[in-house]
């Protein structure tokens, strides 16, 4: 009888990219609308991706099956 494996969460895999060094990268929130209220500096920083916090990394790694 084969061992049953958990499927990876496809929605999360579309949002998280694993780098070559193993870090999980994500995009910032608060970008999609109400941009007129945000400063240019704020919008510029939100465009860049950032790494997932180390407290969330273990959970994300489990959900995407890596």
Image (cartoon, helix red, strand yellow):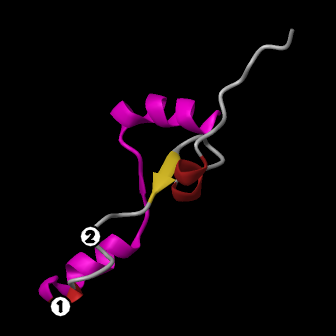
Disc 1: which residue = 36
Identify the residue at the far top of this view: 1
Q: Residue furthest left?
A: 37
**Camera-nearest residue between 17 and 13:** 13
Percent across and percent down for residue 63 are: 54, 35
* Residue at (59, 39) in percent of width and height: 64
Residue farthest along the front direction in this orientation: 1
Horizontal arrangement in the rendering, residue 66 relative to residue 32 (left or right): right
Q: Is residue 48 above or below residue 3?
A: below
Question: Residue shown at 22%/81% (left/top)?
Answer: 41
Magenta residues, as a range? 37-66
Res 9 → quadrant: top right
Q: Is residue 39 above or below residue 11?
A: below
6 shown above or below 24: above
Q: Residues within 10 Å of mark 1 (few under 14, many from 20)?
A: few
Q: Secondary structure at mark 1?
A: helix
Question: Does the image show residue 58?
Answer: yes
Q: Where, by quadrant of the figure, is residue 21 drawn? A: top right
Left or right: 7, with 1 as reference point = left
- Image quarter of the C terminus: top right
Is 66 in front, or is 14?
Answer: 14
Q: Which residue is mark 2?
A: 30
Which residue shows up at 45% across the image and 31% down it? 59
Q: Position of residue 12 (x, y in %)?
A: 52, 49
């Amino acid at each position: 009888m084969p061992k049953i494996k958990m499927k990876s969460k496809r929605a999360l895999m579309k949002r998280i990219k694993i780098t070559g060094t193993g870090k999980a990268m994500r995009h910032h929130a608060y970008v999609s609308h109400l941009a007129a209220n945000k400063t240019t500096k704020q919008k510029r920083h939100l465009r860049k991706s950032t790494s997932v916090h180390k407290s969330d990394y273990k959970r994300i790694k489990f959900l995407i099956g890596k």
